[in-house]
Amino acid sequence: MKKIIAAAILVAFTLSIAFADDLPDMPLKVTYRKAVMGEGYVIQFHNISEDLLPIRVTFENPPTKTSKEFRLNIPAFKTKEFGHLEGWTALLGDKITVENANYKTQHLELKQSVSEK
């Protein structure tokens, strides 16, 4: 019985990976800028579609091993900014994962831009 359950889980996992590759790219552009007030950066989520885009965003700071998850709804062709006032002080090196079940997951990392060097 345990072998059957393990096999079923393996098949389900394999199918979920196969279908994830078939998903379209998320209609979202992610940029960032230095925060005007306070420290860190403000992450900008640009919905480039004509539909409301609900997303789940996970911020992770590898050096401190801290992470936090947020759910955002971004209106069509609009930008939502997210920084320390919204609940996360984004720093260089932070990793960001953006998810929506209908699209490929985006994985990003905050890196120093050429103009900041």
Image (cartoon, helix red, strand yellow):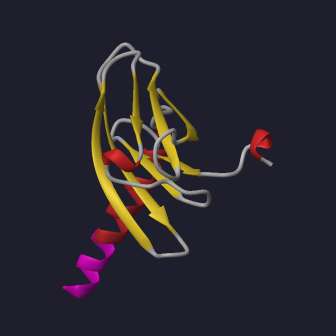
Q: Quadrant of the N terminus?
A: bottom left
The residue at the point 54 percent across, 59 percent down is 94
The residue at the point 43 percent across, 46 percent down is 98
Q: Say which of 99 and 17 sits in front.
A: 99
In the rendered image, the vertical position of residue 38 relative to residue 47, given as above or below? below
Residue most extreme to the bottom: 2
Q: Could you tell whether 113 is left or right of 98 in the image?
A: right
Q: Which secondary structure is most common in the magenta stretch?
A: helix
- The percent position of residue 112, horizontal first and vertical second, equals 71, 50
- The percent position of residue 6, horizontal first and vertical second, equals 30, 79
Span shown in magenta: 1-8
Q: Say which of 36 and 31 sits in front.
A: 36
In the rendered image, the vertical position of residue 2 relative to residue 25, given as above or below? below
In the rendered image, the vertical position of residue 117 relative to residue 44, given as above or below? below
Residue most extreme to the left: 1
- The percent position of residue 34, horizontal first and vertical second, equals 58, 42
Q: Say which of 11 and 73 sits in front.
A: 73
Count of numbered marks: 0
Q: Could you tell whether 71 is left or right of 11 in the image?
A: left
The residue at the point 80 percent across, 42 percent down is 114
- The percent position of residue 91, horizontal first and vertical second, equals 55, 57
The verdict on residue 55 being magenta is no
The residue at the point 52 percent across, 52 percent down is 40
Q: Say which of 17 and 27 sits in front.
A: 27
Q: Could you tell whether 102 is left or right of 21 in the image?
A: left
